[in-house]
Image (cartoon, rainbow, N blue to C red):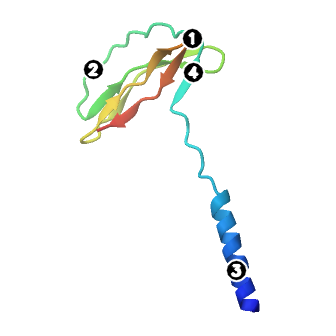
Amino acid sequence: MIIRTVALTGLLVLGAGATLYTPPAQARAYIDVRIAPPPPRHEEIAIREGYEWAPGYWNWNGRRYVWIGGHYIGVRAGRHWAHPYWEHRGRGWRYHEGYWGR
């Protein structure tokens, strides 16, 4: 009887823990801002073997736009770099982070 009670209690605790668990939230891959970003700045680049150019972009720091200069990133076989970009949505602008795509 005691073993059955302990086993049942253990199952109830495990079941409650499984239903209460929520996986950690993933980081947002975008930022929403009401003010349009300035036009991109022109950057001079040179082709480098084994690297791809990630162009600069305007980043929102919570109060204003700040220019983040472009940089070279190592090429990944079978993938391409999707550049970050700002998209006009409704009354504001949404920033989408860059990522490696297939």
- Residue at the spot x=65%, y=68% of the render? 15
Residue at horizontal 55 percent and vertical 42 percent from the top: 26
Q: Which of label 1 and label 3 is nearer to you?
A: 3
How far apart, in angstroms, are the residues tagged by discs 1 and 4?
Answer: 10 Å
Distance in Å between CA atoms under marks 4 and 3: 49 Å
Please give the label number shown on residue 91: 1
First in sequence, mark 1 or 4: give its number: 4
In the picture, the quarter occupied by the C terminus is top left
Asked if residue 61 is positioned above or below residue 34 in the image, the reply reads: below
Task: Name the residue at 62% across, 53% down.
Answer: 22
Please name which of the two marks, 3 or 2, marks the residue nearer to the observer.
3
Q: Which mark is residue 3?
A: none
Label drawn at residue 46: 2
Residue for badge 3? 8
Closer-to-camera residue (45/40): 40
Please indicate whether residue 29 sits to the left or right of residue 10 in the image. left
Front one among 21 and 47? 21
